Image (spheres, grey):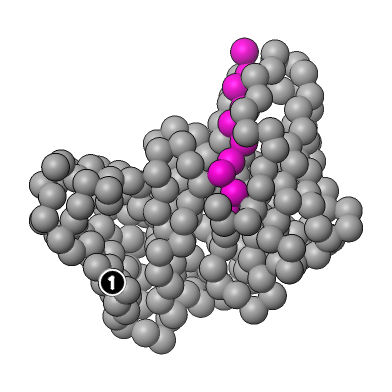
Amino acid sequence: SQQGEEDPQALSIQEGENATMNCSYKTSINNLQWYRQNSGRGLVHLILIRSNEREKHSGRLRVTLDTSKKSSSLLITASRAADTASYFCATDGWAGGFKTIFGAGTRLFVKA
Amino acid sequence: DTGVSQDPRHKITKRGQNVTFRCDPISEHNRLYWYRQTLGQGPEFLTYFQNEAQLEKSRLLSDRFSAERPKGSFSTLEIQRTEQGDSAMYLCASRGQNGNTIYFGEGSWLTVV
């Protein structure tokens, strides 16, 4: 089974609003990453947060990590129509070496 | 363009035929991954190479699937005796020795009819 599970499965918001996506995982991790995928395309790396970090920012992205709850959230502020995509969390487990496991994703739709 | 290229981008094949996909990773990357993705799902891990060594293989990779990376550079994923359930996008990705970021290709779409 997949390591990460995103919530919600789908999210529809108006342009300018904030979008929050959550990810839960099952085992201990080295780091957690978020990726974006436009329809029918490959995945693009957005941001990485290490297991000893609690929050990280990159532009309009804010990621938090709570290792005690085995969860992470991705916040996209001031969303734009171009943010419409699927967003996936991915984890590298301690025991899994460099095997990276992805969740099922959150489909974000930003209405102009 | 991430620098990871996959070929072919699209393949339509009849059930029972064999297909092979090729992946050329970023040249200095020693780690290479194959994933499979179906509509509405996340990428499912298939296999992972470090240089030419195949270090991990998912249970999803049945006997009909084989992957190679003979010289530690490009990789091939072969599916023998294709079934309709094999229809998916096959994603290749690579990663550097000390890097955490995985760089994906644009994927190879397989349709088995």
Residue A63 versus residue B75 in the image, above or below:
below
Residue A85 versus residue B94 in the image, above or below:
above
The span picked out in magenta is B104-113
Q: Nearer the viewer, residue B26 or A47?
A: B26
Identify the residue at image location x=69%, y=17%.
Answer: B13
Splitting the image into 4 quarters, where does residue A60 fall? Answer: bottom left
Residue A29 placed where, x, y %?
48, 74
Splitting the image into 4 quarters, where does residue B107 fall? Answer: top right
Residue A51 versus residue B100 in the image, above or below:
below
Identify the residue at image location x=69%, y=52%.
Answer: B47
Residue A67 appears in the picture as rendered? yes
Q: Nearer the viewer, residue A1 or B88?
A: B88
Lateral position of residue A99 relative to residue B31, left or right: left
Residue A1 versus residue B17 in the image, above or below:
below
Q: What is the magenta segment's predominant secondary structure?
A: strand
Residue A4 appears in the picture as rendered? no
- Chain letter of mark 1 equals A
Splitting the image into 4 quarters, where does residue A25 fall? Answer: bottom left
Q: Nearer the viewer, residue A34 or A1?
A: A34
Can you identify the residue that label 1 sits on? A59
Q: Amino acid at mark 1?
A: Gly
Residue A21 placed where, x, y %?
25, 58
Identify the residue at image location x=46%, y=56%.
Answer: A44
SS state under label 1: loop
Lateral position of residue B99 relative to residue A81, left or right: right
Residue A33 placed where, x, y %?
43, 67
* Image quadrant containing the C terminus of chain A: top left
Q: Residue furthest right?
A: B71
The answer to whether residue B92 is magenta is no
Question: For the residue carrying disc 1, how many other residues have a C-alpha within 10 Å: few (<14), some (14-19), or many (20+)?
Answer: few
Q: Residue furthest bottom?
A: A52
Q: Residue furthest front?
A: B1
